[in-house]
Amino acid sequence: MSKKSLSAITAIALFGFFGCSNEPKEVKSEHHIEEIHAIHHHIDHEWGYTGKESPKYWGELDEKYKMCGIGKSQSPIDIVPTKDIELPELKFSYTSNSHSVINNGHTVQVNIDSGSFVEIDGKKFYLKQFHFHTPSENKINGKHFDLEAHFVHVADDGQIAVVGVMFDEGAENPIIKKIWDKFPLKEGQKVAISLSPTEITELFPKDRDYYKFIGSLTTPPCSENVKWQVFKTPLTISKEQKEKFFNLLGFENNRPTQPLNGREVFE
């Protein structure tokens, strides 16, 4: 698959199946079709991380991407907690396997069979895919990490929730190795991969304390009202695993941190 957009028929079909809205109600619009497209495929019009397609130009590349330039609740951020409210435990119910890994030209993305969800604020958000950024997009107290995984979930009403996991250089990560061993080398290439629910959750730290804030997608269309949960404790990847991911892409695929604009960061 190239970085060109899917056909209108495919986009409408995705919208009809999943629904999408930035608010807790269904709002059907071209923008929301675009948003679901971005969530599932991470691919669309020409945008990237270098040159005239780099993040500072995203808001100018397409009218549908204007939030990348004018949004006031954008992600990623430098996570510096502003309020300690003793956040409740995240309730994961991951019951489905992964089915494929794709090199979409922006990242390596693992797609998940339907059924898995996390409960946040009393609402179920269903896991669609997870993907990786190097170095990390979010910072924690000013620190970048070597790799960040984003687990992207969508509720029935279309609201999005992302769970972020940080990785620092250290011991080899066996689950990352299993994914990296299936690396599609060509852009658009998709390879079958079966990760069990147990293996997927092994990409979470044992200590599930996390930060929480409202933000956006970190790629076009940069849609806002996204619930972000980022685990405090990083996992490890080896130097070789870090270098293999970078060498596959050939560039750093992290959007710069965005202003908080008065948002609270909870812990």
Image: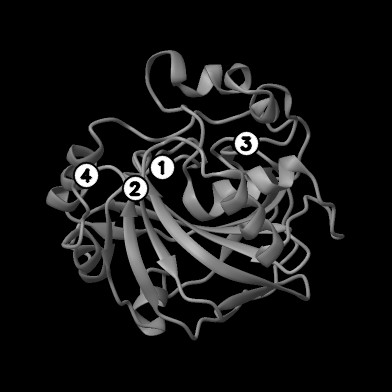
Question: Between marks 1 and 4, how big is the CA–CA gap?
Answer: 23 Å
Residue 267 visible in the shown view? no
Mark 3 and mark 4 lie on one chain; the one further toward the N terminus is: 4
CB under 8 Å between discs 2 and 1? yes
> Dot 3 lies on which element?
loop
Q: Report the residue marked by disc 1.
A: 136
Mark 4 and mark 2 lie on one chain; the one further toward the N terminus is: 2
Mark 2 and mark 3 lie on one chain; the one further toward the N terminus is: 2
Q: Give neighbour class at mark 4: few <14, some 14-19, many 20+ (Cα, 10 Å).
A: some
Between 235 and 107, the residue placed more toward the observer is 107
Between 250 and 85, the residue placed more toward the observer is 250
Q: Report the residue marked by disc 2.
A: 147
Question: Between marks 3 and 1, how big is the CA–CA gap?
Answer: 20 Å
**Way the structure is coloured:** one colour
Query: Taking 241 as reference, is 72 above or below it?
Result: above
Q: Report the residue marked by disc 4.
A: 186
Q: Give neighbour class at mark 3: few <14, some 14-19, many 20+ (Cα, 10 Å).
A: many
**Residue 46 appears at what percent x and percent y?**
46, 27
Q: Is residue 222 left or right of residue 230?
A: right
**Residue 235 appears at what percent x and percent y?**
34, 61
Q: Amino acid at mark 1?
A: Ser
Question: Between marks 4 and 2, how big is the CA–CA gap?
Answer: 21 Å
Residue 82 visible in the shown view? yes
Mark 1 and mark 4 lie on one chain; the one further toward the N terminus is: 1
Residue 221 numbered mark, or none: 3
Q: Amino acid at mark 2?
A: Leu
